Amino acid sequence: MAATELISALLLFLLICSSDISSGEKTRRPQPCKRLVLYFHDILYNGKNAQNATSAIVASPAWGDKTTLAAPNRFGDVVVFDDPITLDNNFRSAPVGRAQGFYLYDKKEVLTAWFGFSFVFNSTRLKGAINFAGADDIMKNTRDLSVVGGTGDFFMTRGLATLTTDAFEDDRYFRLRVDVKLYECF
Amino acid sequence: MAATELISALLLFLLICSSDISSGEKTRRPQPCKRLVLYFHDILYNGKNAQNATSAIVASPAWGDKTTLAAPNRFGDVVVFDDPITLDNNFRSAPVGRAQGFYLYDKKEVLTAWFGFSFVFNSTRLKGAINFAGADDIMKNTRDLSVVGGTGDFFMTRGLATLTTDAFEDDRYFRLRVDVKLYECF
Amino acid sequence: MAATELISALLLFLLICSSDISSGEKTRRPQPCKRLVLYFHDILYNGKNAQNATSAIVASPAWGDKTTLAAPNRFGDVVVFDDPITLDNNFRSAPVGRAQGFYLYDKKEVLTAWFGFSFVFNSTRLKGAINFAGADDIMKNTRDLSVVGGTGDFFMTRGLATLTTDAFEDDRYFRLRVDVKLYECF
């Protein structure tokens, strides 16, 4: 092969290489670098279930109280939670961590919520935390929150969490399926 | 052109290319990859305006209540909101989405706030959400919040939101101009 | 040197260059690009210390109130704060900024908290804000929150904040040492 042919091959390689650089961010989009599907279970305090409750209303609008969800559509209720995380949808399965933080209901016309919370892991398999924030348009089949950071095994991660309501029983229990797709891993 | 000259040109290109790599993060700073200017409108519940109110005090310090902003400087009041987002500063314009989440007032000496909320879009033009968090030093002409993530059209985005108080009427209404500058787009 | 030898050297350089690209994200992990160690001081309002208090309970569960931390383990209490930040652990040192936002206690069995807040700087040395979110497993010696964004001198930054309880006095005062390690700087 002549030197000029080699140089042509190099130039082609450089072009590919440089276009990779310029579109560097985009290449992280299609495939998550890590993915976890987990469930968490929320039992709201109603004044009588202190033993079982994993969450409690701590703030409510002027027309609300702390043992009944406000009407209409729970608008203004703020709930603090410490919910078990399980690998399958069975509430009795051994938890792999806790979902801890808060959610608040933020629309009068329909059920919507806003979440700020963490998945806190402390098992042999998983250490550290994943931190979430975002809007939950509850009436949609699936909706996405942001993964805004992580610690330990999830150092500096970012991504999306797709929520599905896997079950709910009147006002007292819900179970969310969380499909965590991480697009930045370190 | 001789082969050696071509090689020199290649080496120069490589140096530029590699310096681009090492300063890769910085090159994203100066120019946003996406920019939106939007307005949102907040009408606080005062005990009498349930029809029009888009927000409500849901928590307050020991000395406060849920229909009057606390003194001094509203310190400790937490407000949940579902505010219309418009493309111009007219409250009656057709909303393109909702600003949903909470703010809290966090200083006794002067008005400052902390926001955790989302712009939730659901129009033909825009789908998805932008998630915000950060401190709002209200008395400054402009102040910046962080865009900590996004979904849908705003998948995994990051950036800044520059707030300006576009209008306010006593304690009951304010309008914020939000200049969203996204520096990471996918 | 012959043209072919130069080309071989170039190819080797290209390989190194391209492997740098593919592992680009990982190279940011080991060394922070910026690091700050700061302290912040929290004095909780107890109904009698309005002059000195820097924080106040603004929400609590049904069994709590706003001048006493709830039992057990303060679960459900939400606190808004405006705490001075100092460079050393002396409460009387000149503050370099304010830690502003909220924390909430989120476990019945043990003390744990969730934080959403900002370090707001406004000195000749530091301008702008660092925004934090995450779980605080208080009983551990050290625990990590996420730095989810920043403004001003901390434009678009991300990283970790390692918290240590540097001091606490019954229910009324605590001092946190915050080791801020930023891994994305612009």
Image (cartoon, coloured by chain):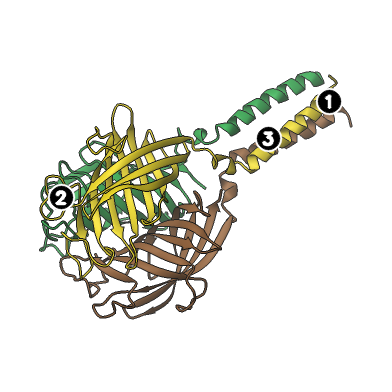
Chain colours: A brown, B green, C yellow
Q: Which mark is residue C5?
A: 1
Mark 1 and mark 3 lie on one chain; the one further toward the N terminus is: 1
- For label 3, the residue is C17
Q: Chain of mark 2?
A: B
From this viewpoint, is residue A113 visible?
yes
Classed neighbour count for the residue bearing mark 2: other residues with Cα under 10 Å, few (<14), some (14–19), many (≥20): many
C175 to the left or right of A164: left
Give the amino acid at mark 1. Glu
Q: Which residue is mark 2?
A: B74
- Alpha carbons under labels 3 and 2: distance apart: 56 Å
Q: Position of residue B72 (x, y in %)?
A: 11, 47
Q: Label 2 is placed on what type of residue?
A: Arg
Task: Give the percent coordinates (x, y) of residue A76.
Answer: 24, 64
Image height of A168 relative to B31, above or below: below
Is residue B86 shown left or right of residue A129? left
Q: Residue at x 83, y 23 (%)?
A: C3
